[in-house]
Image (cartoon, rainbow, N blue to C red):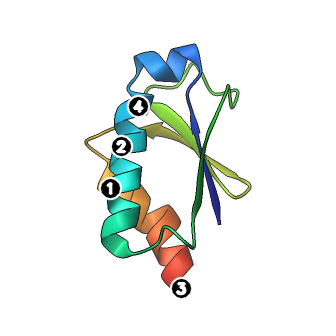
């Protein structure tokens, strides 16, 4: 699985580096570093939507924040990796 986190200027201002740190910590906690390829990327084309944009494989997820990170991680990453 590949997870891209937007680090473009809009997402940067919305907290993309916080999301990167949360993602790295959660992947380590779950022991998934070898199953998830985490990368930064530039614009995913969803700048007008609140929160940070991420892409999990081919699916773009918008509106990711520190407050909803756990829900997004569980639904879009953990459930697919552990399937």
Residue position marked by numbered label 3 in the rendering = 83
- How crowded pointer 1 is (Cα within 10 Å; few <14, some 14-19, many 20+) is rated as few
Residue position marked by numbered label 4 in the rendering = 17
Residue position marked by numbered label 2 in the rendering = 21
| Label 2–label 1 contact, CB within 8 A | yes
For the residues labelled 1 and 4, the Cα–Cα distance comes to 12 Å
In the rendered image, residue 75, in percent from the top left (x then y), is placed at: 45, 66
- The first of marks 1 and 4 along the sequence is 4
Furthest toward the bottom, the residue is 83
| Label 2–label 3 contact, CB within 8 A | no
Q: Nearer the viewer, residue 40 or 14?
A: 40
Q: Is residue 47 left or right of residue 68?
A: right
Residue under the point 55% across and 27% down: 7
| Label 2–label 4 contact, CB within 8 A | yes
- How crowded pointer 3 is (Cα within 10 Å; few <14, some 14-19, many 20+) is rated as few
Of labels 4 and 3, the one closer to you: 4
In the picture, which quadrant includes the N terminus? bottom right
* Relative height, residue 69 to residue 12 (above, below): below
In the rendered image, residue 25, in percent from the top left (x then y), is placed at: 32, 56
| Label 4–label 3 contact, CB within 8 A | no
Residue under the point 44% across and 25% down: 50
For the residues labelled 2 and 4, the Cα–Cα distance comes to 6 Å
Residue position marked by numbered label 1 in the rendering = 25
Identify the image quadrant of residue 8: top right
Residue under the point 40% across and 52% down: 23
In the rendered image, residue 55, in percent from the top left (x then y), is placed at: 63, 47
């Amino acid at each position: 699985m590949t997870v891209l986190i937007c680090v473009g200027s809009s997402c940067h201002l919305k907290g993309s580096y916080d999301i990167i740190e949360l993602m790295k910590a959660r992947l380590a906690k779950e022991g998934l570093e070898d199953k998830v390829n985490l990368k930064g990327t530039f614009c995913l084309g969803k700048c007008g939507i609140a929160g940070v944009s991420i892409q999990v494989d081919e699916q773009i997820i918008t509106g990711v924040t520190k407050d909803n990170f756990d829900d997004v991680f569980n639904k879009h990453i953990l459930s697919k990796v552990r399937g």
